Amino acid sequence: MASFARIVSLVAFGLAILGLIGANQGIMAPLTGFQLCIGGALLGGLVAVILSLVAIVRTRGGRDPRGRQNAWLGLAIGLGLVLAVLAAAATGGDAPPINDITTDLESPPDFAPASTVVAYAGRDMSYPPDFVEIVRTSYPDLKPLFLPGPVDATFARAVSTAESLGWTISARDDAAHTFDAQEATALFRFVDDVTVRVREEGSGARIDVRSKSRDGRGDLGANAKRIERFLAAMR
């Protein structure tokens, strides 16, 4: 039992690492790697914890010192995996289960057509109406950015800012003052789509941003944080 508990914990750890490295290096799809990593760490970790606790009880009293050592090792690894998953989830635990965020809920910026960005083909790039009230309630401080100066200059600066943040520009319309870009997350390389729109507002310019995840229903707050980083860099 003790040896088996240790083996289970090591297998769980191995699956978590395999999923992480596989997704990060492009060996497997980001969602597949994420599911393998989280599933291996959480489910495997829980099984390892349970088996280890049973083994610790069975080996008490010095009946099997080596087995008890294996049980404690399995418990440490299993518990560490479970806590790592819970800690990661806690960073965005209060975020609503949505994956498309914008600063303009009345008229969300549109993404470029699929004829321009092939990755959009076969996907619904329209803004989900049921997300509007959720975004308004969950992210009340997420607003358009108003800057002084001509629209052309502000748009050019917005493009430069996006590139400085590591975004990959995939579409650009200088006449409409809009551009689309993509950003991959650091660990699992999830690709999220962003569109930025600059409009004349009074004597200055208004900047609206929309960020949409390609995978999953929830984003753990990643899209809102991306928008906030961009707008902060523009201020």
Image (cartoon, grey):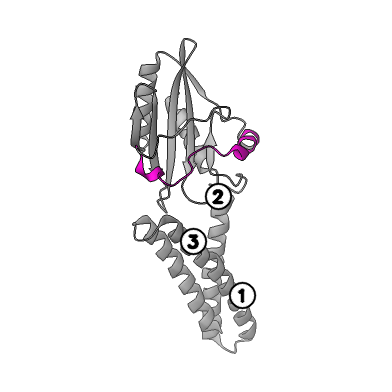
Query: Quick one: label 1, few (<14), some, or many (20+) residues within 10 Å?
Result: some
Q: In the picture shown, does residue 154 fall above or below 11?
A: above
Find the magenta span and give its range: 116-137
Q: Tag 1 or tag 2, which sits nearer the N-term?
A: 1
Give, as a three-letter code, the residue at label 3.
Gln
Give, as a three-letter code, the residue at label 1.
Ile
Residue matched to label 3: 35
Q: Tag 1 or tag 3, which sits nearer the N-term?
A: 3
In the rendered image, residue 1, in percent from the top left (x then y), is placed at 56, 85
Which numbered dot is residue 167? Answer: none
Residue matched to label 1: 50
Using the numbered discs, state the Cα–Cα distance from disc 2 to disc 1 in whole angstroms: 31 Å
**Residue sitting nearer the eye, 62 or 148:** 148
Residue matched to label 2: 217
Query: Quick one: label 3, few (<14), some, or many (20+) residues within 10 Å?
Result: some
| Marks 2 and 1 close (CB-CB < 8 Å) | no
Q: Tag 2 or tag 3, which sits nearer the N-term?
A: 3
Query: Quick one: label 2, few (<14), some, or many (20+) residues within 10 Å?
Result: few
Q: Please give the name of the residue rendered at 54% of the width and 84% of the height, measured from the top-left corner.
A: 67
Q: Residue furthest top?
A: 203
